[in-house]
Image (tube, helix red, strand yellow):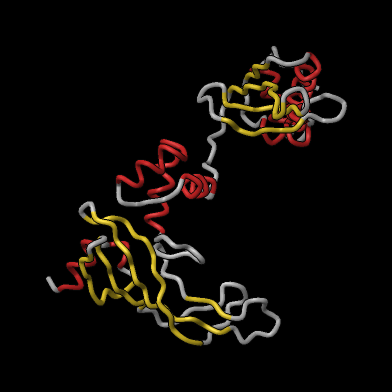
Amino acid sequence: MCDQEWLDGLLPHLAGAVIEGIERMPAGVRVWARVDANGASCWSCGTPAVHSRYERTLADLPVAGQPVALRLRVRRFFCDDRTCSVRTFAEQVEGLTTRHAQRSSPCRESLAQVGLALAGRAGARLAGLLEMPASRGTVLRLVHALPEPAIEPGTVLGVDDFALARRQQYATVIIDAVSHRRIDVLPVTEDGVPEVARRARLGQKMKGIARVYDHVTPAMREQISEALEARWNRGLAVINDTERGWLEQHTPWLKLP
């Protein structure tokens, strides 16, 4: 196995770059690499034109308990589209670099997972022990930058009121009563009726819902029932006579309009 193949196996996240050298320093390991791509396009308008080259330094994942500094030589491109707001831009390595970042993408992802588990202060302490030093503010910022997780639709909906600011600002939280995951947070309208009771938004949340549990006002309970009934009626409006006859025969307890 040649040196490049050996390095690709040891550092798979650097497969998009050519490693030119590795040096052990008193403060850790330093890796020199360059981008080996045919070209790049402006992230704003797509126009390619080589302008110059420069070297950027990224904090990378530790190796054998040693911090790693990645010195990556990249090309800077010039955008000659006069209508574009971007003048120059640097090429990026997919899965390794992002614009204006001082850490590699795998390092950012690892810090975000530490932050999810331990939050800011404790996460920053653990990150330092793992040779990925970061402040608690950085850890929290990386957590906030994570995309929202996909929420599986539930069948039992929970609705409750809580105070964003005590005695000043209130909101309504919608949760999946089975998994206890938060689905949405909606403001309370001026007339005191939670936004969850509005049919326009409630229709998006009620698909597949079998039961609703709430600990709020009777007004909310009544309007939620109306929203469920409205969704049922809209569904009946698009069925044909054959389907309606089947429903009447097999579900006599249903009241069809």
Q: Nearer the viewer, residue 176 or 185?
A: 185
* Residue extending farthest front: 26
* Residue extending farthest left: 1
Percent position of residue 120, x then y: 47, 40
Q: Which of 189 and 163 is in front in this view?
A: 163
Residue for point 69% across, 12% down: 253
Percent position of residue 65, x then y: 23, 51
* Residue extending farthest right: 191
Q: In this view, does 51 lie above or below 103?
A: below
Residue for point 55% across, 44% down: 148
The quadrant where residue 242 appears: top right
- Quadrant, the N terminus: bottom left
The quadrant where residue 217 appears: top right
- Quadrant, the C terminus: top right
The quadrant where residue 69 appears: bottom left
Percent position of residue 199, x then y: 78, 32
